[in-house]
Structures are given as C-alpha cells and as structure tokens.
Image (cartoon, grey):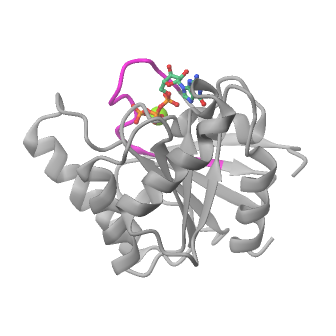
Amino acid sequence: MKIMNAEFIISAVSPAQYPLDALPEVALAGRSNVGKSSLINRLINRKNLARTSSQPGKTQTLNYYRINDLLYFVDLPGYGYAKVSKTRREEWGKFIEGYLTGRDELKLLVHLIDLRHPPTADDIAMYEWSKHIGLTVCVVGTKADKISKGHWPKHAKIIKDKLGFDPRDSFVVFSSETGKGREELWEIIREKAGL
Ligand code: GTP
Ligand code: MG
C-alpha cells in the first residue's frame, strides 16, 4: 500500500466521537507495551504518528488514524497492565467491549502477541472472546527481531496451540523494527477491509 496520507483524527473517549463517514476500520488490540502503536507507525512508515512509549499503559483512549482517506486504524488501549487500577480496568473493559461488539465499520481485529513468550491468560481470554463475538482476527506475533529467525516457527506454534487458534484466521510474524511482515499484513488488511 502506498501511503499518500495518514493523519491522526481523534482520541475518542465515547462512541459519540467515533467518525461518521463509515470507512472500514481495523482495530489493534494487545497487552500494554506489545507494540500496537509501533505497528501502526511501521505500516504507514511514519516514525511517530501513533504515540509510542517504553512506559506501558500510555494509550488509554481509542485513537483513530485515517489512512489515504480509505480506512481507519483504531489503536486500542492495552490490557493486562497491573498498575492500572481495577476501576480503570473495568471501565476499559466496558468501553472496548462496546466498541468491539457494536461497531459495524470494524472489519478486522489485529491481535498482537509478543512472539518471544507464550500468550498470557489475558491474551487467551481476549482471543477466545473475540472469536466468541464473531470477529475476524489476524494474530500478529510482534518483536520478531528479538529472536532468531530459525526460532520463529516454534514460537508461532506455541502461541497458536495455547490460543486454540482458528485456522481460518491469519497469523503474521512481525517486527516494527525491521519491517518484517509489513507487506503480508497489508495484504490481509486490504482483503478484509474490502479495499
Ligand atoms: P500501550 O500503548 O502502552 O498499550 O503500548 P503499545 O502496545 O502501543 O506499545 P508501543 O508501540 O508503544 O511499544 C512499546 C515498546 O516496545 C517501545 O519501546 C517500542 O520501541 C518497543 N517495540 C515495539 N515494537 C517493537 C518491535 O517490533 N521490535 C522491537 N525490538 N521493539 C519494539
Ligand atoms: Mg500504544
């Protein structure tokens, strides 16, 4: 995908702020710090359009980015960050749940999981729930540059086994650092978003 135009639209804190133009949406979910914002930046080849941080739990709103006036990336707040209060976590749950279950424009959930480690209980719960509500999911194994290429298949298999991966979903090994998986992921996004 040639990126002609990418712009930050809004940090939404309520559904009233979601865009009204009915463009397809691709949402990014995963643990805090797994690399959601970095993946958006890599997909559009911008250094810092989506705010990244080595401090987990930074993204707390639903951040919309419009790409080529064709689709939106929706950067969701990360889950599983222990230092976030229980009340905050419950609010997160309600807000995200509402978005993921009720948004007709949502065509694909990109679910990021750290390729280096087996999925956490939160990762498994997120995946199972998103399948339960009938979302089309692409699982992305992130930070692939941190392990040797020869180990990628083994790590991917552990993640798939633990998730109870649905073979109809796609799985992409990805690195925001090197760009590995970028084209493959764009292809999936293009197909699922109907572009
Ligand atoms: P929250 O917004 O807190 O939920 O985090 P996030 O999922 O958006 O993570 P973010 O993109 O901010 O990345 C977190 C940290 O991991 C940053 O220090 C990134 O530089 C680093 N990182 C992200 N992706 C990669 C990757 O593919 N390779 C390497 N080596 N580091 C990465
Ligand atoms: Mg982020």
The quarter of the image holding the C terminus is bottom right
Specify whether 15 is left or right of 149: left
Specify whether 16 is left or right of 90: right
- The percent position of residue 92, horizontal first and vertical second, equals 25, 50
Pick the residue in front: 120 or 98. 120
- The percent position of residue 6, horizontal first and vertical second, equals 75, 42
Q: Is residue 153 above or below residue 15?
A: above
Is 112 magenta? The answer is: no
Residue drawn at point x = 51 percent, y = 78 percent: 104
Residue drawn at point x = 46 percent, y = 21 percent: 53
Q: Is residue 81 above or below residue 195?
A: above
Specify whether 107 is left or right of 1: left
Q: Is residue 133 above or below residue 98?
A: below
Find residue 16 and report its image quarter. bottom left
Residue drawn at point x = 40 percent, y = 35 percent: 59
- The percent position of residue 8, horizontal first and vertical second, equals 63, 40
Find residue 150 and report its image quarter. top right
Report the magenta stretch's main SS: loop
Q: Which residues are magenta?
A: 52-65
Q: Is residue 96 above or below residue 132?
A: above
Is 56 magenta? The answer is: yes
Residue drawn at point x = 31 percent, y = 70 percent: 129
